[in-house]
Amino acid sequence: KVRRQKWRVPVASVLERGGVKIARDDVVRDEPTNNIPDTIFTKLGQQLHRRSQHPIGILKNAIHNYFDSNYENKFDKFDDLCPIVTVKQNFDDVLVPADHVSRSYNDTYYIDPQTVLRCHTSAHQAELLSKGYTQFLVTGDVYRRDSIDSTHYPVFHQMEGVRVFSPNDWESSGQDGTAYAAEDLKEMFGRIGTPLICTLELLGAVEMRWIDTYFPFTDPSFELEIYFQEKWLEVLGCGVTEQEILKRSGNSNNVAWAFGLGLERLAMVLFDIPDIRLFWTTDERFTSQFSEGQLGVKFKPFSKFPPCYKDMSFWINESFTENNLCEVIRGIAGDLVEEVCLIDNFTNKKGMTSHCYRVAYRSMERSLTDEEINELQWKVREQVESKLNVVLR
Ligand code: FA5
Ligand code: MG
């Protein structure tokens, strides 16, 4: 397995994270059971959510303040739990079925068959509930193999919120526990004094809608979408926690709500940040525009460089997946790739299926030369053929 690419800057062998040392060899080993590339490893210690001048940190602090003032400091806050978790924590403990797609090597970064980079902050729910916490927020970096566009990145940040109610809380309301928790949840995100709405008010009119959805760990389950850049953007998932999770954590008679908020998505709306890659830039023209405690300052774009499109067609095989393709392209072009989009798809009489992908290259910081892009695209074609075993057309 080729993982280290010689044209990549070598990464440090040890990362320090909140006093914990993570050795590169413990995370990236060239074994077939490990699918973590260098580009992901280098993100492990960065903790954008703990930087008070960074939009992600500014947003986290604002939501913390909101909970402190509206719930009398009763929410416990965690933002330094290690992103390396067990399969049990990430999946089993939140009732993700054994055959669920999210468990696959195609969707999740595995260190070894029992250890993953958490794909959501829900990985910490069960443990904290078992320890007796009943109202808490967990913020952290999460990792997913995913598609490439302006609102998807393989590393992003989530904030998990959980609130447990006991029978005393709902009995006098005349509702059952589930109805009570669902109402409290929506009310929290609703009109009066929600962290979202409070901050979104700065924007003037923002269109939002609730979508019914499914999660293995909540029932009923909802997603909140916000209208942004002429599309509906999903910013969070939430719902009433499955009884089984509460039962296992010693909360048999209680009910709870939980939510998982995508901090980048909400920050994009609040600060008007057009592309998710910008959160990772160290360019001062970006970083200097944000300061501690300043929510909703409109980002002024400094880059109007044109994108460059390259199309690529190939016959796929049974094992082809778009996530694998995106991983190969990201491995070569890094943050120079802006979008990978399927533009044509057909099956011939012999049953062979052809895909055509359009790759958009664009730097956030500078103009790219034709030469540079051609070289990237050349390497992409080479590796798509050699690593994905597809036949270029
Ligand atoms: C979850 O991760 C659930 N754990 C959320 C949850 C928690 C539901 C508690 C119920 C109870 P989902 O996969 O939809 O759900 O991700 C949550 C949010 O993360 C999304 O709404 C989106 O805002 C953000 N997100 C997901 N994938 C990406 C990505 N590749 N890049 C940036 N943000 C993303
Ligand atoms: Mg979702």
Image (tube, rainbow, N blue to C red):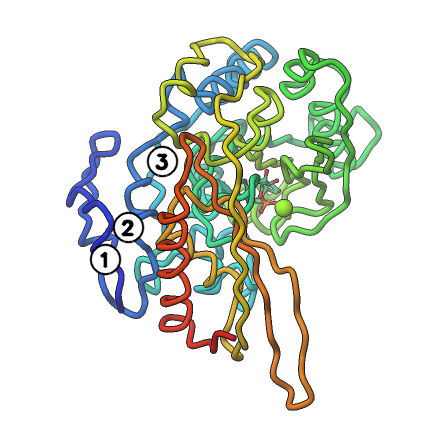
Label 1 CB less than 8 angstroms from ligand 1: no
Nearest to N terminus: mark 1 or mark 3:
1
> Quadrant of the rendered structure where residue 48 is?
top left
In the rendered image, residue 347, in percent from the top left (x then y), is placed at 67, 80
Where is mark 1, residue-wise? 4
Quarter of the image where the N terminus is located: bottom left
Q: Is 279 situated left or right of 258 in this image?
A: left
Q: Nearer the viewer, residue 239 or 1?
A: 1
In the rendered image, residue 40, in percent from the top left (x then y), is placed at 34, 47
Do tag 1 and tag 3 residues touch (Cβ < 8 Å)? no
Nearest to N terminus: mark 2 or mark 1:
1
Residue furthest left as drawn? 13
Residue depth check, mark 3 versus mark 2: number of the one nearer the observer = 2
Where is mark 3, residue-wise? 81
Where is mark 2, residue-wise? 38
Q: Amino acid at mark 1?
A: Arg
In the rendered image, residue 39, in percent from the top left (x then y), is placed at 32, 47
Residue furthest bottom as drawn? 350
- Mark 2, secondary structure of its residue: helix
Quadrant containing ligand 1 reads top right
